[in-house]
Image (cartoon, rainbow, N blue to C red):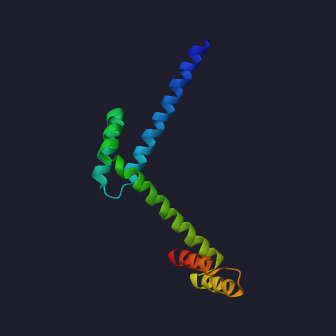
Amino acid sequence: MPVLDFLWTMLWFFLFIAWIWVVIVVIADVFRSQDLNGWGKAGWTIFIILIPWLGVLVYLIARGHGMQERQAQQHADQQAATNAYIKQAAGTTDADQLEKLKSLHDSGALTDDEYAAQKAKVLNS
């Protein structure tokens, strides 16, 4: 097998894998979307499966702007759930953390600015 044929085969293999990845990401976004009802999700899924190139391109043009927002919201929700689980598993509450911060501030281990930043972080989480 000549080297050029091998490189050509590798290029097509890479493009095929990239295409599968794009289709999976788009279909996952269809099902992640809260603003689509069941019929809308079914319609987009059928469109993407029956006419893949056109379906994906139309979806990216029509709804691509919200894909990053939906993914960021999912990551934020997962992070919040993880933080809540860690707090619950560790048995610490915000009041406990604030007490520890206050004691560190009173002992001089934290400056006023560090204390205020940490306190804001605890209160916002």
Residue most extreme to the front? 112
Q: Is residue 71 above or below residue 22?
A: below
The one of 113 and 2 positioned closer to us in this rendering: 113
- Which of the image's four quarters has the N terminus? top right
At horizontal 31% and vertical 44% (from top left) the residue drawn is 44
Q: Is residue 99 above or below residue 5?
A: below
Q: Is residue 11 left or right of residue 92?
A: left
At horizontal 61% and vertical 81% (from top left) the residue drawn is 112
Q: Is residue 74 above or below residue 87?
A: above
At horizontal 57% and vertical 20% (from top left) the residue drawn is 7
Residue most extreme to the top? 2
At horizontal 28% and vertical 50% (from top left) the residue drawn is 40
Q: Is residue 37 left or right of residue 90?
A: left
* Spot occupied by residue 50 in the image (x, y as percentages of width and height): 33, 35
* Spot occupied by residue 42 in the image (x, y as percentages of width and height): 31, 47
Q: How many marks?
A: 0
The one of 25 and 107 positioned closer to us in this rendering: 107
**In which quadrant of the rendered view does residue 23 lie?**
top left
* Spot occupied by residue 63 in the image (x, y as percentages of width and height): 32, 48
Q: Is residue 7 left or right of residue 16?
A: right
* Spot occupied by residue 28 in the image (x, y as percentages of width and height): 43, 48
**In which quadrant of the rendered view does residue 48 lie?**
top left
The one of 79 and 121 positioned closer to us in this rendering: 121
